[in-house]
């Protein structure tokens, strides 16, 4: 499938599954918390792959103006309707491709992308675009999915829309190539989501010292390389200045 056909496939898939995008649960609260920690007053924020905007509306209630970019027009339409119904004004949405962001350089202080990067085939172009639109000293909070996790195998068998999971080493190399320095990583979903139901799910969501048991187990040395979801916080590395002769 060509990149263009794949994007059309992703768009159609999400247009058919709008209801599945519209909730904040589990990791959603952790993501919101990370954005709270890394947002700077009223500085503009970009959500790359904003979908129907559920999380964005929660962010806009507390932080700066949230801009959203997404491929799926139907998701953006729903997002606009919900934002209007909630009378939220500090939100803007554009239909666009993350590989060619429709924003000028150095525009945002914070950029985040959740549940989206595993629909991206050309990860280098997308991360380079993130770096371009991010201002000096800006921060990205990105959710990656790990190709070495059991969930990766399950997703390959189960989902109609192919995913592009990356190994932790490929994530790190891609971020470094684009000019980001990783400052923190958080690991989740060591146990496959199709097994984490009922009592196991309740056990794994138990909190110990502010973090869930799932996160504690998923962050253990070595084992963490098999955790399915990895939230990465990284900063824009300043361009290397050539020494004066
Ligand atoms: C699973 S949804 C996640 C939406 C939202 N971030 C959330 O966490 O609920 C993935 C979103 O990524 C968007 N997407 C995928 N590939 C994209 C691309 N190349 N450019 C822009 N958006 C893209 C899809 O249209 C979809 O709305």
Image (cartoon, rainbow, N blue to C red):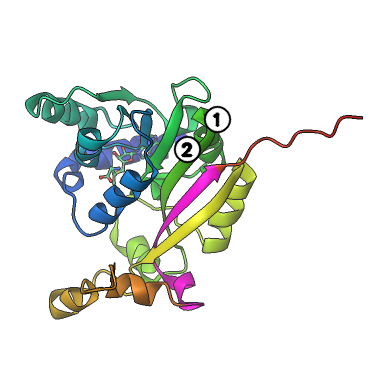
Q: Is residue 98 visible?
A: yes
226 over 144 or under it: above or below: below
> Secondary structure under badge 1?
helix
Q: Nearer the viewer, residue 154 or 191?
A: 191
- Quick check: is 233 in the magenta stretch? yes
Q: Are marks 2 and 1 in contact (CB under 8 Å)?
A: no
Query: Residue 55's quadrant in the figure?
Result: top left
Q: Position of residue 103 (x, y in %)?
A: 45, 21
Would residue 170 be found to the left or right of residue 102 on screen?
A: right
- Residue at coordinates 44% horizontally, 29% vertically from top-left? 108
Q: Nearer the viewer, residue 33 or 132?
A: 33
Q: Position of residue 209 (x, y in %)?
A: 29, 72
Q: CA distance from mark 2 to mark 1?
A: 22 Å
- Quick check: is 74 in the magenta stretch? no
- Residue at coordinates 22% horizontally, 59% vertically from top-left? 26
Numbered range of the magenta stretch: 221-235
**First in residue order: circle 2 vs circle 1:** 2
> Residue under circle 2?
3
Crowding at dot 1, Cα within 10 Å, few <14 / some 14-19 / many 20+, comes out as: many
Q: Position of residue 36 (x, y in %)?
A: 31, 45
165 over 240 or under it: above or below: below
- The quarter in which the N terminus is drawn is top left
For label 1, being within 8 Å of ligand 1 is answered: no
Q: Position of residue 178 (x, y in %)?
A: 60, 42
> Residue under circle 1?
132
């Amino acid at each position: 499938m060509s990149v263009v056909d794949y994007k059309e496939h992703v768009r159609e898939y999400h247009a058919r599954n709008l209801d599945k995008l519209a909730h904040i649960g589990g990791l959603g609260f952790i993501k919101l918390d990370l954005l709270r920690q890394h947002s700077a007053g009223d500085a503009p924020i970009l959500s790359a792959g904003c979908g129907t905007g559920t999380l964005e509306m929660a962010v806009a209630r507390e932080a700066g103006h949230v801009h959203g970019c997404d491929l799926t027009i139907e998701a953006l339409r729903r997002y606009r309707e919900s934002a209007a119904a909630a009378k939220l004004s500090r939100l803007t949405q554009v239909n666009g491709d993350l590989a060619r962001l429709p924003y000028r350089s150095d525009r945002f202080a914070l950029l985040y992308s959740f549940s989206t990067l595993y629909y991206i085939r050309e990860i280098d172009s997308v991360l380079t675009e993130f770096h371009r639109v991010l201002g000096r000293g800006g921060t990205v909070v990105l959710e990656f999915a790990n190709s070495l996790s059991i969930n990766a195998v399950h997703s390959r068998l189960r989902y109609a829309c192919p995913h592009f999971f990356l190994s932790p080493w490929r994530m790190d190399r891609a971020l470094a190539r684009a000019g980001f320095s990783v400052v923190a990583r958080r690991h989740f979903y060591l146990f496959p989501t199709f097994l984490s139901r009922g009592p196991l799910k309740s056990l794994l969501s138990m909190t110990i010292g502010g973090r869930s048991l799932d996160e504690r187990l998923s962050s253990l040395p070595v084992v963490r390389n098999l955790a399915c979801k990895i939230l990465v916080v990284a900063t824009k590395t300043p361009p290397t200045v050539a020494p004066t002769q």
